[in-house]
Image (cartoon, rainbow, N blue to C red):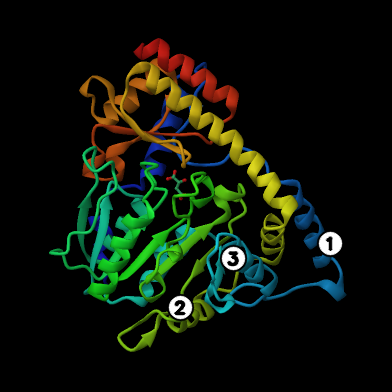
Amino acid sequence: MKINTHYLDLEESYLFSEIAHRVARYTEEHPEADVIRMGIGDVTLPLCEAAVQALHSAADDQSKKESFHGYGPEQGYDFLRDAVCRYYAKMGVTVDVDDIFIGDGAKSDVGNILDLFDKDNTVLIPDPVYPVYRDTNVMAGRRIVYADANRENGFLPMPDPTVKADIIYLCSPNNPTGAVYSRPQLAEWVKYANDQDAVLLFDAAYEAFVRDPELPRSIYEIEGARTCAIEFCSLSKTAGFTGMRCGYTVVPSELTRGGASLRALWLRRQTTKFNGASYPIQKAAAAVFTPEGMAGCRANLEVYRENARMIAGTLDELGIWYVGGINSPYIWMQCPNGMTSWEFFDFLLEKAHIVGTPGSGFGKNGEGFFRLTAFGSPEGTKEAMRRLKELLG
Ligand code: MLT
């Protein structure tokens, strides 16, 4: 018996597990510390009323023989796929209902999609990046090349036509930096992907935070994307579904590689390995897309946006360089006084009892940077910013 030795090439633990362990150790040793968590991008506000009502009513459905649901369609119920279609239509994007696959969140699908691709492909990943893109490819033993994101390019790297890639990852609004690509910038990436016959994996999990109408929220706003891009989206951040688990992946019918339809391959993969997101969760997800649901979600997003404004304002006052926070829940700041990311993590935890995420956990270019999230409570964020000013002012 041989294990997959590529797992041994990974860091010992996943970034957010490592942070959770360190914070748990710290709070055990300092039970009096009032720790404010601005590390993992986890939402804190409850679900919108429409989703809660739908959950209750789905539970009632499951209690009666006439309305009970067993296995659902692996691709998701039509009521939810239609709602996702209409959501795209409101953005001015046409997506065919058959291109939509409901899943249990973007993270799973981003990892699982790799089942479709050969091990020999070269993967292009921005650095810094959401660790799932990197780790899932390390697990498979694929060759990874990095596109450097840094202060000079505003943490928005552009394609280099001399670099050959088969699988390309982009996330916009970006995790971890909060930077957002413009339409012309994404058009360059789409052209690059089509020219190379590559597949572009576009993570749109934070699209709901885009306020500026000039900025794209879906890769399919870009001409040519349907022949090269797969889009992943999730209700985790849009609708507070981190504890509910529901997302959707769009694989356009026009996307073919090696003479095969990737949509057909993904359907084959899902029907074999996935039995669908649960009925009550899909009912709640469909309620999110109703006018009442959307209004409830918008109200929650506004609270997080206000937190982001508060964080950005504090960094402005302190004269600390940062990006993000306007069309994103993440603020990516430079560590003060030349500290490394983990030094600043320890410093902030010990001196101000604030938890953030060290930039180096997202890649080598993240060294010297730090991510704060706006997903906390307004009171917690305000108090954290008071402590930050006291510490660094
Ligand atoms: C993060 O903090 O980067 C996110 O919570 C990760 C995720 O969405 O899985």
* Quadrant of the drawing holding the C terminus: top left
Q: Secondary structure at mark 2?
A: helix
How packed mark 2 is, by other alpha carbons closer than 10 Å (few <14, some 14-19, many 20 or more), is many
Q: CA distance from mark 3 to mark 1?
A: 32 Å
Where does residue 101 sit, x and y in percent of width and height?
A: 54, 72
Q: Secondary structure at mark 3?
A: helix
Judging by the rendered image, the residue that carries numbered circle 2 is: 266
Contact flag, marks 3 and 1 (Cβ < 8 Å): no
Q: Earlier in the sequence, mark 3 or mark 1?
A: 1
Nearest the viewer among 149 and 377 is: 149
Q: Secondary structure at mark 1?
A: helix
Where does residue 338 sit, x and y in percent of width and height?
A: 21, 23
* Quadrant of the drawing holding the N terminus: bottom left
Judging by the rendered image, the residue that carries numbered circle 3 is: 89
Nearest the viewer among 36 and 97 is: 97
Q: Amino acid at mark 2?
A: Trp
Question: Does any atom of ligand 1 lie closer than 8 Å to the CB of label 3?
Answer: no
Residue 47 appears in view = no
Where does residue 217 sit, x and y in percent of width and height?
A: 48, 55
Question: Does any atom of ligand 1 lie closer than 8 Å to the CB of label 1?
Answer: no
Q: Quadrant of residue 23?
A: top left
206 in relation to 350, above or below: below
Q: Amino acid at mark 3?
A: Ala
271 in relation to 109, above or below: below
From the viewer's perspective, is the residue at label 1 or at label 2 nearer? 2
Nearest the viewer among 9 and 86 is: 86
How packed mark 1 is, by other alpha carbons closer than 10 Å (few <14, some 14-19, many 20 or more), is few
From the viewer's perspective, is the residue at label 2 or at label 3 nearer? 3
Q: Earlier in the sequence, mark 1 or mark 2?
A: 1
Q: Which mark is residue 60?
A: 1
